[in-house]
Amino acid sequence: MLSTENAVRQVMVNDRGVISLSAKSLHFAIRRGLAQWNIQNDKFQNLSTMAYTNRGTSEILVGGSQYSMLTVNLDRGTVLGEYDTEDDIKVMKRSSRSIVYGTAKGDIKLLDMNTMKIIKEFSQVHGSAISDIDTQANTLLTCGYSPRQGAYHLDTLVKVYDLRMNRALPPIGFPSGAAFVRMHPKMSASAIIASQAGQFQIIDIMNPAAMKLYHANVSSYITAMELAPSGDALALMDADGYLQLWGSPDKIRFTELMNPVEWQDPHPLPNIIVNEDTPLNTIGMPFYHDDLLSAWPPHMVFDVNKLPQKIDSDILEASAKTGYAPYHKRTPRYCIEKTPTDTPVPAPKFLSQQAKSKNRDSGDFGDAKLLFGDEARRQFEVPPAYRKVEIKYSKFGVDDFDFEYFNKTRFSGLETHIANSYMNPLLQMYKFTPLLRNLALQHTATSCTKEDCMLCQMGFLFDMLDKANGQNCQATNFLKTFSSLPTAARHGVLEEDSSGNGSLTAMIQSLNRFLLDQVSLDQRNWDSNSTVLEEAINVAATKIQRCVVCGKETRPLGDTNVTDLNYLPKLPNKPVMAFSAIAKQSIQLDTNQKGWCDKCRRYQTQVMRKTIRKMPKILMFNATAHEKTANFAKDHWSTPGWLPDEIGMVVTNSQLNIYQGDDLDAMKERDRSGALIVYELVGFVAEIKLEESRNSHLISFVNVALSSVERTEDNNWHMFNDFMVRPVSKEDALDFTPKWKMPSVLCYQVKSASNVVDNSWRDHLDTSLLYHDLTYGEAKYKPLTPEEGPRPGMLVALDAEFVSMQNEEIEVKADGSRSVVRPSRLGLARVSVLRGEGEDEEVPFLDDYIITKEPVVDYLTEFSGIHLGDLDPMQSRHALVPLKVAYKRLWLLLNLGCVFVGHGLLKDFRIINIHVPKEQVVDTVDLFALKTTFRKLSLRFLAWVILNEEIQLKTHDSIEDSSTALKLYRKYLEFTDAGIMEVMMNRVQVEGMKWGFKPPSRVLAEMGQDRIDTPPILRDQRSEANTPQPRSNMTRWPSNA
């Protein structure tokens, strides 16, 4: 037995070997077990923990229950330095910026890795000794003991700290008492917390309610817990000496970069002469020099399916032969099918990579065979163009992804990295339905400020897609508002509320019905007298219900905005029913069903029949709403040409008749009264099911010719696969013979409303919201007056500040590279707009702070100027407005023709979720970009080098930043007018290279560097001189600055 002093208290590894720590010694051995050195120093009194320093894995810091910490060089095995401390150190970990240790008094302290001095201290994190800590990125987790009822017990709270902001975050509850804690090495927001009794939880730090609970079966108690660097394995050690390994057996790996194990050199084998008298037991077994055939390398070992169980002979004897089972393969019986290759959509290069290679072309994406597959196999295999597309993230985030590679058309796609983006195809179909688009935009142009108005959000989205003209968009605000609706969760149309096993078709059909109901409700709430939207989407009908027993008849209203198609089974040797017949029996429903009879006072069979009063201008069908008739539906849809692109309807004496094909052409010739209503197919949403996996996704096919202002062709079908948009032929779009393609939602619109794109709403914008004064207390801005109302070409300066609503998730791959699994998400916190011209130039007229209802992960105070409580209505000293009010104000300025001036506006507009055409944007980050290196300069540096102003000294302020951008634009006009822009940019580049493109410190600024000065700007934007003048008297910083 080893003495207590020699017991190993901590083990660490590096690429060369294993370091073990005891109370008075430090030991290093290579992985084969051979000792390299062992240190026993007089200053090692009672060591308990160690951690790597900023020198990587070649130096460690050791400490414990003693008055000093020591650094040890692992390459030479020598003590380098000693640092005094008064703390009884229990556990120590290295973070990205410092070394963190916990003490016996419950304190947490941060050490600078260069000086080993304390730079931050969190006092009394726990009532007594710290039990365990762990850190990942900028997050610190701690657990420890506290005195309760005369004894020390493990705390039931795990404390969480943000090391970047040096502040506490909400703790995580753990009722069993947290003894050990580990952060996941790949998922920065995930952690594992364990108790001594064996219970451990895997939680999301940002959402502690989302957890998974496990329990290790131990007879004593847990003494140690460790997580593998790969994150695939968890080891638990108990007091009985048993080690439990948790993980997925089929993919467990301990490290990402594994080195082969170093074994000892084999002993030489003796030569044995074998004859008749040689006993066989003298020959070693196995006795060989080469590898055995059974020693298969890992890459040659595969999992195979189990053999079928043998059928009992009694069962076989009692069975009778009735025929052959159907052959399920696609190929003849004498052929072996070639394993299909999963050909994904080729991924483009990142924009940053294209810039480096000076090649903005990521490759040829126009190969029809590559995209749409081989005709011979297309019936069974999903072509790459129909597969789910995913956004790849570089270190620059989603802005570095080449969306243009997937979309060469003038129709914009929608991005997918947002929750509930499964509804993108349905939104695209709505957008290209002219009547629905016109009604949504006409409502949006009113003064409606209802926060959860989906009709307004629909109008905002449609306008953004129109203005984007082929550039990628995202439905962030629409989806955020939709997710906040309390009724959405009850209808099962939110991804987070779905079980994951539900059909996407069922979800999109429920969503279609829910959205149409919701926008109708929004329109009624805004104008109770307006029935335009309801008349456009509602089938006006009356239900006639009659009890078969007593004959009592009731006539409730049967209005509906979506019709579920009901299919009948295909009769043998008979063609399937036409679409017109299926649609007629589905709209004019005639069924028998159980229902309550008030006269009989019991449930009786009811005969139900629908009579049609009026047909709408937009017809919506759910294609496969009933699971019982799903097989019948496939029989109909797999019939070539079954879906017509044009149908006609006539309502006579409450009876509905539907025509298609030749019958419709004949009816057009006979119709003299105008009773015939002709509908055109706008598009449909289809579910794409991959055979080799359970995953499926939705895409939409839309005839965009119906929504063009001037129709030059009858059909112009496009496929919208999220952000990938491709033109397709009508035949391919309406081909449902492939087994992987099945329609979900259909949309027809009256032919008379096609190509009627009404943009008159732009002339009737309600601009009263721009003149509202929402300030209280000390006003920081002067509201607009109707006399200075916005007009086309009017300059306004804009800047916005954001807070972090969600951290990004990073995955570390086997080669050490990192990839973003989930990007960070920013939310609008403040937006300021300044006058860009007139007597009150540079005076703000909007300065909105945005109310946030969801938790803020990081206020980013250093970059945003937003502090804790600024966005809380109960604490804020600012006038807070809802996001919709702030957004609608910017939307009004956009549609009134204002020109926005700012610095880095592209990112601001993206997060705000608004698209501004290039002709309405003046971005100083582009005006002052270096043409030789394509470098874009910061606003702070440009203000220093061009305006001779110091900004952003402590934090950012949107009013200051927008004012600075406006001044820079004025300087740009001045330099361009004087013909010295190139000279000035050369000077900017020289100054930038001198100072690293950052403003120098105040001390260097006082040394008196000469600047280039320019004459003052005149009102007609012309200067009085054509040459710059050297500035002799530099503005000095005040002595008390």
Image: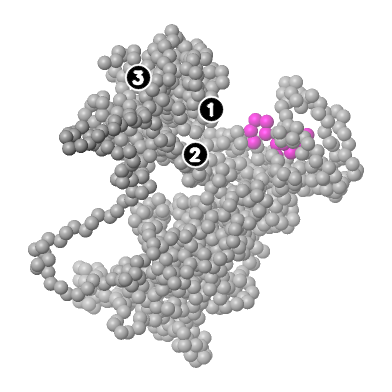
Nearer-N-terminus badge (1/3): 3
Which residue is found at the position 35% from the left and 75% from the top?
635
Residue type for callout 1: Arg
CA–CA distance between discs 3 and 2?
31 Å
Give the magenta-colored segment's residue range: 939-956
Which residue is found at the position 43% from the left and 7% from the top?
42
Which residue is found at the position 56% from the left and 69% from the top?
727
Side of 893 relative to 329 (left or right): right
- Name the residue tied to disc 3: 8
Question: Can residue 683 be spotted in the picture?
Answer: yes
CA–CA distance between discs 2 and 1?
20 Å
**Judging from the image, what secondary structure is the residue with disc 3 in?**
loop
Crowd class of label 3 (few under 14; some 14 to 19; many from 20; radius 10 Å): some
Q: Indicate which disc residue 118 carries.
A: none
On-image quarter of the C terminus: top right
Q: Indicate which disc residue 816 carries.
A: 2
Rendering coords of residue 495 (x, y %): 41, 53
On-image quarter of the N terminus: top left
**Judging from the image, what secondary structure is the residue with disc 1 in?**
loop
Rendering coords of residue 895 (x, y %): 66, 58
Question: Can residue 514 be spotted in the picture?
Answer: no
Rendering coords of residue 956 (x, y %): 64, 36
Nearer-N-terminus badge (3/2): 3
